[in-house]
Image: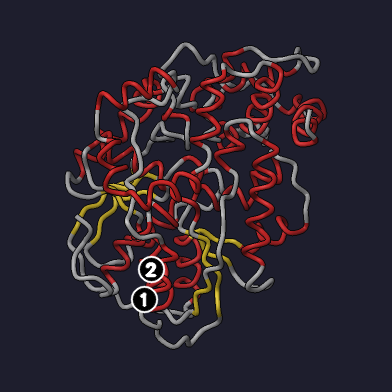
Amino acid sequence: MTDDLNHARDELMRASLDHCVKCTICETQCPVARVTPLFPGPKFVGPQAERFRHGESVDESLDYCSGCGICTHVCPQGVKIAELNIMAKAVMKADQPPPVMKGLRDQVISRTTVMGKAMTPVAPVANAALGIGLLRKAVEKVVGVASGAPMPTARTETLRAWLRRRPAPPAATREPIVFFHGCAGGYFEVETSKRTIEVLEHLGFQVLVPKQGCCGLAQQSNGLFENARTSVLDLCDALRSVGKELTIVSSSGSCTGMLKHEAHHILGVDDPRLLDVGARIRETSEFLLELFESGEVLPEFRRVEATIPYHQPCQVKAQGMGMPALTLMEMVPGVRVVESGQPCCGIAGTYGLKEEKYDIAQAVGKPVFEMVKATNPDLATCDTETCRWQIEKGSGVRTVHPIELLHFALGLSDDLPL
């Protein structure tokens, strides 16, 4: 067993499980337990079950935990329930490896950078192939990736290619900052990354974009702890390469959470490189709201008459930052934001891509889909990439990062992204 999995096993044995008072608040708020009997709830498979495991492999119902983190977020006793469950799941998979094809699937879907590099050169063909129902059904049968699951749209140009060909940015009037775009932001959600950079430059910042890889979150979520540790430390080296005291900004909300706390608390990475990066990184909306509320920058927004549905992803909720995106959007004159009121959209990174969990993910996401359609059938907003793909596929409503509304309101684009 690797050091990373030893950490998971040991940390489970050392955890202060008796902080759990069995209030069952986590059970009532769990988005998975509310839609399927296959998952008995975070308390049952977490603090309660852990008292009886004695280092042995856990009940397979634990695999239905999506790792959304809502249980930890709502626990009044501060029990790290989601972290316990994710570590226990990794130990379970090491003790009882999944079937070969499902293990291969978990390896493939957790490497977004590899997918992006493979799909970009053949983007039209890749997108066409992903739209062929019979092909998707065959992949589902063989590998276990659900045929109805949302898939990213391949782009013909990566973010790095755009950076190389774009005109010189305006002269900076403020300090440099580092932009972390995440895997999807480099290959699939390129427009989100471009517009984030343009907004930051418009506000006077010099934006540094070092060559960078994956944060390891998807690998961690699939129990691939050793690979995740390597990925996150390589990323930290990349982000630190352009300056060790600069603020790091990211429009990938889930990846930001990985660097802020998950890699440390779940993987057990105590490396000073991670602790440094985790202390300096801010999600884009979080950074901009702090900037505007400080009075250092007073944005000049044009009026936008719109009612916009907004869903905050579970992995952004888990960072305990409130809802900066909602507050930011409502700074735009004429904008009214309607928050989903739901804990999770169901996708939970790669969870909803899996054939055996697809129906659960859709049931979890259904209230979000219905709220979005009822609020604005043309436009919705959400902070993370896979959640946007899930909401757009489930609702049929164009779903974008809040930065795209701000980009338009600042006069940097001519049309809302409808």
Percent x, y for residue 39?
A: 52, 16
Mark linked to residue 199: none
Percent x, y for residue 288?
A: 46, 67
Spatial distance from mark 1 to mark 2, Cα to Cα?
6 Å
- Helix, strand or loop at mark 1: loop
Task: State the count of labels.
Answer: 2
- Whether the residues at callouts 1 and 2 have beta carbons within 8 Å, the answer is yes
Report which residue position mark 2 lands on: 162
Observer-nearest residue: 312 or 65? 65
For residue 244, what is the image quadrant? bottom right
**Residue type beneath disc 2:** Trp
Establish if 100 lies above or below 297.
above
Q: Residue at x 19, y 70 (%)?
A: 414
Establish if 25 lies above or below 409.
above
Q: Left or right: 334 with respect to 273?
A: left
**Residue type beneath disc 1:** Arg
Establish if 182 lies above or below 69.
below
Q: Residue at x 50, y 54 (%)?
A: 182
Report which residue position mark 1 lands on: 166
Observer-nearest residue: 155 or 63? 155
Establish if 16 lies above or below 374.
above
Q: Left or right: 388 with respect to 377?
A: right
- Which coloring applies here? secondary structure
- Helix, strand or loop at mark 2: helix
Q: Left or right: 338 with respect to 373?
A: right
Percent x, y for residue 100?
A: 56, 19
